[in-house]
């Protein structure tokens, strides 16, 4: 990455889980943009996303999800199950061919930009180092911060995952804005749900526990936009809600 890259930036609120994942999958795998594309997005209703290598039937009680009309989608990136609907999510699609080391550096660069945005909000956040704790075998994404993810007060504030495609790198992430509206632990297929619920409560931080809730989602997104602009020395191409519009209109 250079400091003079042009990039597109957009905010697409209140989309379904399927549409949110389809936009990222399409631009990462099928038609990478000519310049980096940064998108923040929210979800129209609570949903659970799983990493691309997870087996939904083994991780979740899918019958209960259907009964409660809780959308379940597969992310094009990896990682473990995430609850959405109370969070602000992001994706960065960076065109080009990347080796493992280059992709790892890109992961750190992107999380560093996001961290600067949080610091601009007055949040005392940092990047997580290598954890010596053993990850619970059945644990969802937010039970533990992995290396390079963003934490605040020792708790995970933002989850991030990355995938290298032949012509682009896709990085996705999620940050809880407030306490969840539904109970993720109650939808897990196996394990001690009470214990997992306690683990999630003790390991997760949400943004509005750290800043005044009068900050709107749009204002938070604008702060992140300026953080990207400062880092790259470029004004984002105006994209607004147009990012992926042609994709979701046909699905």
Image: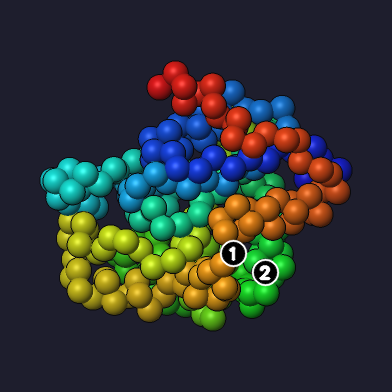
Which disc number belongs to residue 215?
1
Give whichever of 203, 180 is nearer the camera. Answer: 180
State the residue at coordinates (60%, 30%): 242
State the residue at coordinates (54%, 81%): 153
In the rendered view of the protein, which quadrant contains the C terminus? Answer: top left
Q: Residue furthest bottom?
A: 153
**Residue 96: x and y, percent?**
69, 33
Q: Is residue 227 left or right of residue 213?
A: right
Vertical placement of residue 127 versus 58, above or below: below
Which image quarter: residue 111? bottom right
Vertical placement of residue 49 versus 176, above or below: above
**Residue 89: x and y, percent?**
51, 51
Give whichever of 146, 204 is nearer the camera. Answer: 204
Which secondary structure lies at badge 1? Answer: loop
State the residue at coordinates (57%, 59%): 216
Picture mark count = 2
Q: Is residue 138 left or right of residue 206?
A: left
Q: Residue furthest front?
A: 214
Which secondary structure lies at badge 2? Answer: loop
Which disc number belongs to residue 121?
2
- Mark 2: give few (<14), some (14-19) or many (20+) Cα within 10 Å: some
**Residue 119: x and y, percent?**
69, 70
In the rendered view of the protein, which quadrant contains the N terminus? Answer: top right
Q: Are marks 2 and 1 in contact (CB under 8 Å)?
A: yes
The answer to whether one can see residue 130 in this image is no
Of pointers 2 and 1, the one earlier in the residue sequence: 2
**Residue 20: x and y, percent?**
46, 38
Which disc number belongs to residue 103?
none
Which image quarter: residue 39? top right
Give whichever of 140, 129 is nearer the camera. Answer: 140
Tell me the mark number nearer the camera, choosing from 2 and 1.
1
The answer to whether one can see residue 155 in this image is yes
């Amino acid at each position: 990455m250079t400091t003079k890259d042009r990039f597109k930036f957009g905010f697409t609120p209140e989309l379904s889980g399927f549409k949110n994942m389809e936009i990222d999958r399409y631009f990462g795998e099928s038609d990478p943009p000519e310049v980096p594309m940064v998108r923040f997005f929210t979800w129209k209703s609570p949903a659970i996303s799983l990493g691309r290598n997870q087996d939904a039937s083994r991780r979740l009680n899918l019958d209960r999800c259907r009964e409660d009309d809780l959308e379940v989608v597969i992310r094009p990136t990896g990682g473990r199950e995430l609850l959405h609907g109370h969070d602000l999510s992001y994706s960065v699609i960076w065109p080009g061919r990347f080796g493992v080391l280059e992709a790892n550096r890109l992961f750190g660069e992107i999380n560093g930009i996001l961290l600067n945005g949080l610091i601009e909000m007055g949040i005392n956040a940092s990047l997580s180092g290598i954890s010596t704790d053993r990850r619970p075998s059945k644990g969802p994404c937010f039970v533990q911060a992995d290396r390079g993810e963003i934490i605040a007060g020792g708790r995970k504030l933002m989850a991030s995952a990355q995938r290298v495609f032949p012509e682009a790198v896709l990085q996705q992430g999620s940050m809880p804005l407030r306490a969840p509206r539904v109970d993720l632990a109650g939808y897990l297929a196996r394990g001690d749900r009470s214990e997992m619920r306690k683990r999630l409560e003790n390991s997760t931080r949400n943004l509005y526990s750290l800043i005044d809730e009068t900050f709107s989602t749009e204002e938070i997104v604008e702060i992140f936009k300026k953080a990207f602009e400062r880092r790259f020395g470029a004004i984002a191409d105006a994209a607004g809600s147009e990012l992926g519009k042609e994709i979701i209109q046909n699905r």
